[in-house]
Amino acid sequence: MSTSLRGAAARGARRPGLRIAVPALLLAGLLAFPGLLPDTPGHLGSLAETALPWFGAVVPVLLGWAALRRSVAGVAAALVPGVVWACVFLPGYLPGGDGARADFHVLTFNVGGDRTTPAEVARQVIATGADVVALEKVPASAVPAYERALGAVYPHHVTANTLGLWSRYPVRDTASLNLGGAWPHAVRALVGTPGGDTAVYAVRLPSVRVRADAGFAIEARDRSAAELAGRVRADPAARVVLLGDLNGSLRDRGLAPLARQLAAAQREAGRGPGFTWPAAFPLVRIDHVLLRGLTATASTVLPDHLGSDHRPVLTGLRGAGGAGGT
């Protein structure tokens, strides 16, 4: 065989490895540094950050490709994004929380759906043992029914439009917060919890959509998130709990103003990805419990059998300095 033919054969043998290495290294870079992906056009960066855990599904595809081509270099390259994915996401599957007893429990639940009823929702909520409950997307016409169904266990409450906050403990300094848009997107109350007076926010940020003409349409949500972050930053309460449907993953740069100043209960004390939406087969976590001045002892995504398109989240909390903080 001539030298030129041998060179061509060698280049052909190396090419499968190179063809696999390029997408593998790009994937590894995306997993490690998603913030470097441009957000234009169509808020592509935010969309990629929302779906980031699922990019790991590409790794087996790359490994299969390398195996079919019998490329050792391709296998090695495909393992790189696999290692990066494991470093980023596997810690979330380890047991969380410190095992301490919770001072109180909070629950957030978007009850939107054609089949939910106040009586059934109340029965499930009460069964969780939660002490403070945030319900989102409550039909305005159903608020009186929710008040009757929950009132015996949660005698203190505040509602605004589609939001409701119910508590076993006294509430005061209640306020409806207009974060922009057609309805109040948050209610705030100071709740006298065993962990100390705590500012509790029940939140439902504007919805997002993926549209052919606009890409990932998140502008309204991002504006409301930034406004809410400003309200929380200015809140004088030492302890803050934000409960609700933020219509986005905390990895999404659009929610960074909130994520930078509040701790995520799922990261502190949850296990696994904590996906909450859609309820039938959750693909992303958009329902959150965010904290300041409190520690999460456990955080669990509960099953929903009521017809909502979200799953509820139950979280145990204690004062950051220990039980009964002031």
Image (cartoon, helix red, strand yellow):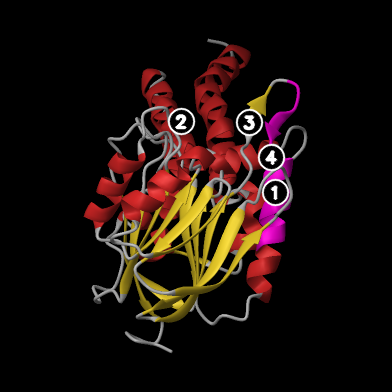
Give amino acid for label 3: Arg
* Coordinates of residue 118 in the picture (x, y in percent): 36, 41
Of the numbered discs in the image, which one, if any, rests on residue 218? 4
Give amino acid for label 1: Asp
Q: Is residue 301 left or right of residue 1?
A: left
Residue 86 appears in the picture as rendered: no
Report the span colored magenta.
213-228
Q: Secondary structure at mark 4?
A: loop
Q: CA distance from mark 4 to mark 2?
A: 26 Å
In the rendered image, which residue does mark 1 sit on? 222
In the rendered image, which residue does mark 3 sit on? 209
Q: State whether residue 179 is above or below residue 311.
A: below
At x 68%, y 36%, the residue is: 44
Mark 2 neighbour class, 10 Å CA radius: few under 14, some 14 to 19, many 20 or more? some
Q: Is residue 200 left or right of residue 103?
A: right
What secondary structure characterizes most of the magenta part?
Answer: helix
Q: CA distance from mark 1 to mark 2?
A: 29 Å
Question: Disc 3, disc 4: CB below 8 Å?
Answer: no
In the rendered image, which residue does mark 2 sit on? 58
Mark 4 neighbour class, 10 Å CA radius: few under 14, some 14 to 19, many 20 or more? many
Q: Which of 36/100 is in front?
A: 100
Question: Which mark sits nearer the N-terminus, 2 or 3?
Answer: 2
* Quarter holding residue 2: top right
* Coordinates of residue 228 in the picture (x, y in percent): 66, 60
Q: CA distance from mark 3 to mark 4?
A: 7 Å
Of the numbered discs in the image, which one, if any, rests on residue 79? none
Give amino acid for label 4: Ile
Task: For marks 2 and 3, give the one nearer the viewer.
Answer: 3
